[in-house]
Image (cartoon, helix red, strand yellow):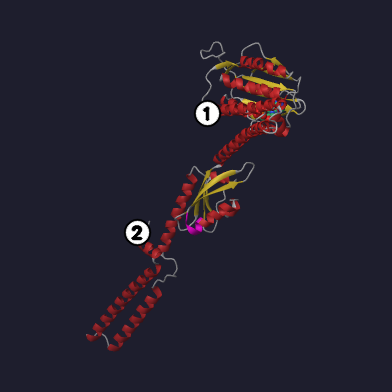
Amino acid sequence: MSTPGAEENLNARQERPDAYWRMRRRERARDCSVLAIGAMAVLIILALSGGLGWIEALTGSLVIGAGALAYYVGSTPTSAGPPDHLIQEKKQVSVAADNEIEAVIATLPLPAFSVSRAGRLLAINEQAQRVFRVQGGIGALASSIIRSPDLLDAIEQVGRTGEGAAFEFVISGAADEVWLAHIARQASAEGGVLAVLEERTGMRRAEKARADFLANASHELRTPLTSLAGFIETMRGPAKDDKASWDRFLDIMYEQTERMRRLISDLLSLSRIELSEHEAPDRVVDLAGIATRQVEALRPLAEERGVTIEVDAPDRELPVLALRDEMTQVVQNFLSNALKYSPDGGRVLLSCGIAPSMDDALGSAGRVWEEAGRMTLLNAPAVEGPGVWVRVEDAGPGIDRQHLPRLGERFYRVDESRASAVGGIGLGLAIVKHIMTRHRGGLVVESSPGKGSGFGVWLPMSTTDAKSNPKVSV
Ligand code: ADP
C-alpha cells in the first residue's frame, strides 16, 4: 500500500521531474548546512569557554564542514539515479493494474487480449484463443498469433498515439470471418494495448444477402420488362402493319408478363413465410390428402405436356402439425419443377408415407436411387418418433453433383438458359427450404444426370390424427 505523501511525491515526480529534483537538492543542502553550522557553533562555544584549544576547534570545524559537504554530494538524489522506494512503489502499482486487466480479460464474455509495448501478448482469454485458433500464447510475439497484419498495425498505432480505435478485420478460412476490434491503450506502466473483439460475420453476410437479393430481383424483373418494351416498340414501328406477326409477339409478351407475375408471387410468398417464420404451426393436417389434391390440380397441365403423374400413397392419413397452404406450396413447387424439366411424354411419380423414425423418413424421401448424387439441403432437428415423408421424382435431365449443394439458394439456377426457357426463376426451392425450417422438417435431393431427379421432404408425424383433433383441418 502507498501512503498519501508517497503518492503525492510519485505524481510530482511523474508530472514535472526537473522541478521535483531541484526541490529535493535544495532540501538536502539546507539539512547539511544546518547540521554543520550547529556542530561548528558548539566547537566555537567550547573554544571560547576554554574547554577546547582554538587549533583543535578550527580543525574540528573544518572536518565537520568537509564531512557535511561529502555527505551532501554523496547522498543528494539525482534524476538519473537508481530506483528508490518510489520507483518500487510505482512498480507495485503497475503490476497490480496489469494483474487486474488480466483478470478482466479472463472473465470477459467477448474475445479479448492485451499486447505489451514490446509487442508481446500479456493476456489472452479462451474466446480470443479460439478466434485465432491457438492455445495459450501469453508471452509470445503478437505477430506470431494474430495473423492479420492490418490488425497488428492498428494495435501498434494505438500503442504509439494513445488514441483508441475500432478496427474491422477479416480472418480468412473455409468461411471468412469478420471481426470488429475495439482497441485502447492501457493506463498501466507497461503502456500495453487492450483489444476486445466483436463478431460481425452474420451482420456482413445479411447485408450482402440483402444487396444480392435486391440486385437479383431487379435483374429478374428488368429482363421481361425490357423484352416487353422491345416488342411494343417493334409493333408500333417496323411491324406496324405486319398484323400476321402480332399474334406471335403477343404470345411472347404474354409469357413475359406471366414470368413477372410468377416472380412477384414467389417474392410475396417468400416475404410472407419469412414474416411468420417464428409462428409454430398448430393444426394437424393430412399430408397425403394435400399431396393427392395437388396432383389432381396439376393433371391438366401435365396432360397438355404429355406427361403422366403417378401417385404411390398409403391408404391412410399422414397427420402432421403443419400449415395447409405452406405444405400445399411445397408439393406444388416439387410437381411444377418435375413437369417443367420432364421431357415430353415423361413420367412423374409422387410417393409419400410414414416411416418408424425421422431417419427412416429421410431414407424414403431421398435415398432411393443407388447410384445417384444426393444432398441434404436442410437437416431436420433430431426428434423421437415416426416421420412423414413426400417425394416427387421425374425422368428429366437430372442435375450434376456439383450443383446440388447450392440448390435452395435464392435465384440459383443450374442451367440459366434451360431454366429461363421453362420459366424458372430460382425461388421455388428456397421457398420450400423456408417452409420446412418452420415445420422442423428436412429437404433432400438426389439426382442422376441423364436419368432424372428426386426431391423429398420429411417432418415429424403428429400423434393426433387429423380427424380426432379439434384443430383439425382435413
Ligand atoms: P426454378 O425452378 O423456378 O428455377 P427452383 O428453386 O425450384 O427454381 O429450382 C432451382 C433450380 O434447380 C432450377 O433452376 C433448376 O436448374 C434446378 N431444378 C429444380 N428442379 C429440377 C428438376 N426436377 N430437374 C432438373 N433440374 C431441376
Q: Position of residue 448 (x, y in %)?
A: 75, 27
Hey, which residue is sitting farthest front in the picture?
241
Whichever of callouts 1 and 2 sits on the residue coming sooner in the sequence is: 2
Q: Is residue 129 above or below residue 189?
A: above
Q: Quadrant of ligand 1?
A: top right
Q: Label for residue 275?
A: 1
| Residue at horizontal 48 percent and vertical 44 percent from the top | 108
Q: Label for residue 3?
A: 2
Q: Find the distance from the CA under tag 1 to the CA under tag 2.
A: 64 Å
**Residue 73 or residue 457, whichever sits in front:** 457
159 in magenta: yes
Label 1, residues with CA under 10 Å away: few <14, some 14-19, many ≥20: few
Q: Position of residue 138 (x, y in %)?
A: 55, 51
Task: Tell me which corner region of the image, top left, top right, bottom left or bottom right, holds residue 173.
Answer: top right
What type is the residue that disc 2 sits on?
Answer: Thr
The answer to whether any part of residue 241 appears in the image is yes
Q: Position of residue 350 (x, y in %)?
A: 69, 18
Span highlighted in magenta in the image: 158-163
Q: Quadrant of the C terminus?
A: top right
What type is the residue that disc 1 sits on?
Answer: Leu
**Residue 207 or residue 91, whichever sits in front:** 207
Q: Position of residue 262 (x, y in %)?
A: 62, 26
90 in magenta: no
Find numbered disc 1 in the image and state the secondary structure of the residue it sits on: helix
